[in-house]
Image (cartoon, coloured by chain):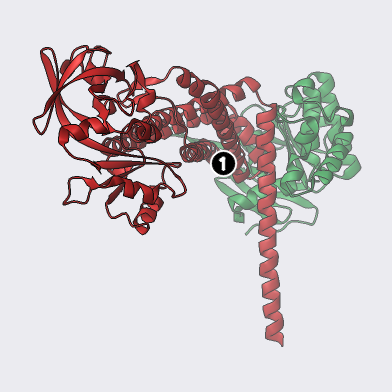
Amino acid sequence: MMKRDGQDTIIATRNLSRTYVMGNMQVTALNQVTIDIRRGEFAAIMGKSGSGKSTLLHQLGLLDTPTEGEIMIDGVDISRLSESEQTRFRLEKFGYVFQEYAILPELTALENVYLPAMALGLSQDECVTKGVDALEKVGLAERADHRPRALSGGEQQRVAIARALINKPKILFADEPTANLDSASSKQILELFRALNRDIGQTVLMVTHELEDADIVDRVIWLADGEVVEREG
Amino acid sequence: MGTKKSQMKRITSIKTDRIGKMASTTTELKVSAFLAYKFIAKGNRGTSALTILIMALAFVNLMFTTSVFDGMGDATEKQVIDTLYSNIVIEPKDDEVYIKNPDSVVKKIIHVPGVIGTSAQYVTGATIAYEERSGAWSIRAVDPDDERTVSLVPDMMIAGEYLSKYDRGEIIIGKEIAGGHGGSLEHISLGGVVVGDTVEVTFTNGVRREYRVKGIFDTNFIQSNQLAYVTEKELESVLGIHDMASQILVKTDTKGEEGRFLNQFVELGVHEDIKPWTVYAGIVATLTQSFSVLNTLTGAIGFFVAGVTIFIVIYVSTVSKRRQMGILRAIGIKESIIIRSYIFQAVFYAMCGCIAGLVIMFAILVPYFIKHPMVFPMGNVTLLIEQKAAIVRSVGLIISAAIAGFLPSWRAVRETILDAIWGD
């Protein structure tokens, strides 16, 4: 049984491993990872390509199932959740920002943003109000009715962030959110994360390979060959 | 008291649970419909138009053969009624050859509401000869005025004229008897008799008479085109009988309600054999049966082809949206919502396809075949779109579409979220 951590711990993993079977070979992407993330923390997972950082984020974000180990999120042992409960958990407690601006091209910025709120059962009016609020937070309220193709890469990523924030998530996961952006847009996105963390106490867990991003976060979890290390070598 | 309270609590809890589930289902339906609407309305218009066109063609494919078969059945039924037996046939009782005093029978039924005509007539076999050629055909002897009230043959003369009440020594013949008019039975015809020629008719009682051909008719129906007509008085003189009839044809203002008239005639004291036209329409029954088998077969294949077509269309759509589906699942949208959104899309396309298909049928194909009917031995055939057939096929196509929408989207949400978003 995993030891329950202090009140401030929102994510806790114990001996988390993920092994992939590729033909006759077993590839260990994560090996006995034990970490704690505090509520309200802005943390980054960093490491070289293939170090297991995205794999770790996927396990914590319930996008994949670990081979071994335990994950406790907001006091819930997620291994006990059924598939549909995990879906609901993701909808209510998580927000995701992917590397590619993963928003639907057929929906306007506002519609993209309020879709998760709609799935929670909110009325159209509530959805619109919350959607506009979220877009205001990312500075895109005036572009609410634009379709993704009319937005720049940075703007699309901000729409994705607004969507991630709409249901007031406990944790905001970001998987290399600036990888496809120019330096100005990247800076804007990181500052947005920082502001959200500072202003509303949003817990943010971000995977990044940009070393300079380490300066903006509270803490860096370094990974190498699927294991947590003191600092990348 | 405590038990009552806990029971009440349980009931309230069950009710709340049910209301919660209903609200959740409503929310899911709402989100599915929203996504489906957006994917259709804001997706690629060309793809949507092409999908609807494919659905429309699948629907036309399903409807066309049925409409031809229904058209053939309808044409045959019309021909049997309009040129052979009218709606109801009154025949002598089993042990008698003729109906005696047919006028008395006619008087009983002529005022029945819905009866619009009667024709008492003799029917006899005869050999008709012209020059070197001859053949056995059926001759009907009619009162031409009465016959006009039950038959369309008088309006289908292609040469000469129809009979008049007091004609003697004159005969009208169908084009299959006359020959020379491109009939199907040219080889057994008289080889090209024209109006004014004289043919020799030998009746079953051995009486032989010569008749001037007064007219030749073409009903477009192979069976009625093998009939010949003389006047009632003419045949009575041949047979040496009077005031009798082999059959009385009765025309009613509606088709399909013959049973009702049959009962009324019996109640009015008609003791002869009364039969609806369907009894004589063996060819129609055989055709209808064969068409029904063909219809079922082509329908089943049509549904299968339509289903596969829709499946491919939706499959291509889901494959191209695989990543999008993965993202939706990642952000917490339930799989059932995603699957339903694809079912809604497929159903929408199928419904549009059915409507477009009906427009193609009614606006293009039906008018075309009215202008250029298909020529069959039972007559000119146009497309007949039965409401029931259209509804059955529409519903079938929509169900096929729903299944075809479900399967690929269900398969797509089976894979892991990571494979959906980042897989090959």
Q: Depth check: give the residue in front, B78 or A130.
A: B78
Indicate left or right for B173 with A232 as reference: left
Indicate left or right for B171 with B22 as reference: left
Colour given to chain A in the rendered image: green
Quarter of the figure with the N terminus of chain B: bottom right
Q: Quadrant of residue B66?
A: top left
Q: In this rendering, is residue B99 above or below B36?
A: below
Residue B292, given in percent of the width and then of the height, sits at 33, 38
Residue B326, given in percent of the width and then of the height, sits at 62, 35
Indicate left or right for A221 with A130 as reference: left
Residue type, mark 1 in image: Arg
Residue B155, given in percent of the width and then of the height, sits at 39, 24
Task: Please give the name of the residue rendered at 31% of the width and 26% of the height, measured from the top-left corner.
Answer: B221
Q: Depth check: give the residue in front, B73 or A176.
A: B73
**Residue ID for mark 1:** A18
Q: Depth check: give the residue in front, B22 or B392.
A: B392
On what subunit does the disc labeled 1 rest?
A
Q: Depth check: give the residue in front, B375 or B156.
A: B156
Q: Quadrant of residue B121?
A: top left
Task: Please give the name of the residue rendered at 67% of the width and 73% of the height, measured from the top-left corner.
Answer: B11
Tag 1 secondary structure: strand
Residue B354, given in percent of the width and then of the height, sits at 54, 32
Can residue A41 be seen from the camera position used here?
A: no
Task: Please give the name of the residue rendered at 75% of the width and 29% of the height, measured from the top-left corner.
Answer: A177
Say which chain is red.
B
